[in-house]
Image (cartoon, grey):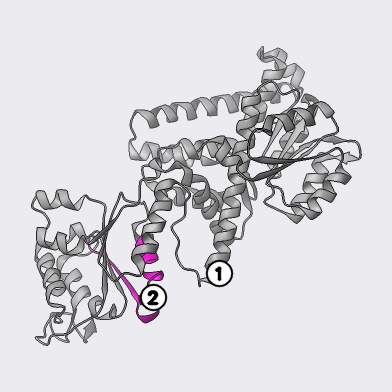
Amino acid sequence: MSTNDLLKRSRILIVDDDHYVRTLLQELFSEGPVEVTVAEDAATAREYFEHEDFNLIIMDQRLPDGNGLDLLREIRQIQPQQMAILITGYADVRDALRAVREGLFDYLTKPFENLEELEAVVAKALELDRAYREINDLKQTLDSRSSQPVYIGQSPSTIALQKQISQVAALDVTVLIEGDSGTGKELVAKSLHAQSPRNESGRFMEINCGALSEQLLESTLFGYEKGAFTGAVKMTRGYLEEADGGTLFLDEIADMSTKLQSSLLRVLQEHTFSRIGSTELRSSDFRLVCATNKRLSDEVRAGRFREDLFYRINVVSLEPMPLRERREDIVPLTVHFLDHFNAKFGKRAGPLTPEALYVLEHFSWPGNVRQLQHAIERVVALHGDGPISAADLACLAEDIADAGEGTEDALLSYQKARENFERDYLERLMEQAKGNVSEAARLSGIPRQNLYVRMKRWGES
């Protein structure tokens, strides 16, 4: 997504008494679709904030009538998710780093030497603001729809899939969902049911064909009479009956045995079935939705799946894409999971720092959305309240090692090791220098300005 797309219809409040800084920032964003408002002091900023909504506030730390940090804390009491960037001189870096830990998105040092980097930071802050707003809007929508499942994302492929779900949901046709593990096939199936008339008339019945033996899957689907087999101590209705009027979701249907494939085909052809141990024919009006992480046409060619059943269930085909192919969805999904697990665990972890967002957006996600969900759950469970940094995402390095990733991820593992070394070195350096940055620069041979940059990166104060 381009910077202009991220800045589209965004409103930025610039608070600085320095005429040069205000003019520079105004001119920097004048050609993009951004509405810029400027204030010279804290009092004017308060007045603007009281009556208007801003996607981002860029504020100087030292204002004529107050301290920018104090004003930002005041603003975040009213709007906890307000995106804010602090402008500071090198002498104020320690305070700025503390502010980052309190929830400030980032800080910029004066004078601005790299305008492209400045634009990138602003664009990333606006992207996170957009994600927060989309999730808040989504929560309101879900509240009005009794918590219907929604396939979250803003990438072109996700928007197209959301449209397909809406179009197909009301049509009483069989749907085949194909996609990699962890891409959200179950969520697509639930969304189809939730948006269909069957949501009011029947249940959503789900069964994983690959998790059960042939005998157990057969009895679960068709039900059985008392005494039909050892252990059948009472009559039990199967999922085919329980799904009457609703939706039957067969996950990992490619793992179904050829015998049960034949049985399912007869049900779809004749619209009748019998419980195990009975000859009485029964009928059930259910909608069939199937899913698989394999390409079912390849399974047909390999002789592992019946061709006639394939054509029966492949009336409409939907395919959620791997997360690595829709990276625009990573931020909104992350914000959604962060909000969910904060509520679940009673915490206030977040927001994510720019470095943390960079790690998330550049990870390969072999486990797709499910892996992202588990990573955020783990971070929130182990993390205290406050910002989430790149260091808090060390669990991804463990996932890489466990998955035995290829070249791209091996390079990321090397980068992680380098980051750990630099962080540890800075900690020991500052300890030896007793917190004196000038002394640390002398001992390390790193220019003071560059040392501040490294301290900012790893949160050293």
- What secondary structure is marked by label 1? helix
Name the residue rendered at 63%, 40% in the picture.
Answer: 33
Apparent side of residue 116 relative to residue 209 in the rendered image (left or right): right
Dot placed on the residue nearer the N-terminal end, 1 or 2: 1
Q: Is residue 446 left or right of residue 304?
A: right
Hey, which residue is sitting farthest right in the picture? 65
Mark 2 residue element: helix
Q: Residue at x 20, y 85 (%)?
A: 233
* Location of residue 414 by image quarter: top left
Looking at the rendered image, the quarter that the C terminus falls into is: top right
Residue indicated by mark 1: 143
Whether residue 345 is visible, yes or no, is no
Q: Nearer the viewer, residue 132 or 218?
A: 132
Q: Is 232 drawn above or below residue 101 in the view shown? A: below
Q: Name the residue carrying label 2.
A: 199
Residue flagged by tag 1: what amino acid is it? Asp
Look at 40% across and 70% down and name the residue there.
194
Q: Which residues are magenta?
A: 188-209
Mark 1: few, some, or many residues within 10 Å (few <14, many ≥20)?
few
Residue 168 lies left or right of residue 140; in this view the side is left
Q: Amino acid at mark 2?
A: Asn
Q: Is residue 69 left or right of residue 198?
A: right
Q: Where does the image place residue 313, in percent across and percent down from the top left?
A: 20, 63
Rendered position, 26 above or below 387: above
**Between 291 and 127, the one nearer to me in the picture:** 127
Q: Position of residue 92 (x, y in %)?
A: 79, 29
Q: Is residue 38 visible?
A: yes
In the image, what residue occupies the spot 58% across and 60% down?
A: 137
Give percent across and percent down for residue 106. 67, 36
Per the model, the C-alpha gap separating discs 1 and 2 is 16 Å
Is residue 208 highlighted in magenta? yes
Question: Contact, CB < 8 Å: mark 1 with mark 2?
Answer: no
